[in-house]
Amino acid sequence: MILFRYKKEEGESGSIVKRPVADVFLKSIDGPWIEFHPYIDSGADLTMIPLSLGKLLGFKKRDGKIKRIGGISGSAPVIFVRGQIKIGDYQFSIRLAWCQTENVPPLLGRADIFDQFDIIFKQTEELILFEKRKLKQA
């Protein structure tokens, strides 16, 4: 089981809010793993990274066609790419929405992640538990 703690941040009103944040790694095209601290967002379809992180990972704008996706805070231009993620000791391929702006929060979305883990939010304890799912035998 992998354990993450809620992180305290300043909210828009200036008050302190606690948010579910994961400490994970994304593999760059050149090979090194880059630490990534996204919000764990059960409402997000895909994992989303900002422009600068995509560039750091080695993605190029020519890697895909720019599309617009929408969410609770509006729409944003993205390029859909694939990447490798490491959560605890587990490494696997995921789909990423590489946002073409910086003004988006990094998100760990459902696609490819929630299929791999059962995720339990323990708000009052300020904990998020990731339990690796067992693969079904055919």
Image: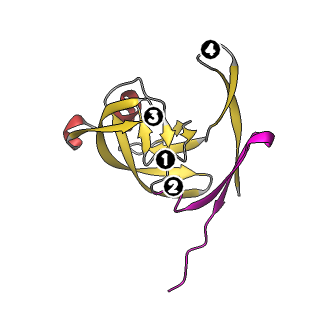
* Extent of the magenta region: 112-138
Q: Residues within 10 Å of mark 3 (few under 14, many from 20)?
A: few
The answer for how far apart the CA atoms under marks 2 and 4 are is 31 Å
Q: Which residue is mark 3?
A: 72
- Is 129 magenta? The answer is yes
Q: Residue at position x 68%, y 31% from top? A: 7
Identify the mark nearer the N-term, 3 or 4: 4
Q: Residue at position x 45%, y 54% from top? A: 111
Q: Which mark is residue 67?
A: none
The amino acid pointed to by label 2 is: Ile
Q: Which residue is mark 2?
A: 113
Q: Residues within 10 Å of mark 1 (few under 14, many from 20)?
A: many
Q: Which residue is mark 1?
A: 109
Seen from this angle, which residue lies furthest right?
Answer: 125
Identify the mark nearer the N-term, 3 or 2: 3
The amino acid pointed to by label 1 is: Gly
> Is 109 rendered above or below residue 56?
below
The answer for how far apart the CA atoms under marks 4 and 1 are is 26 Å
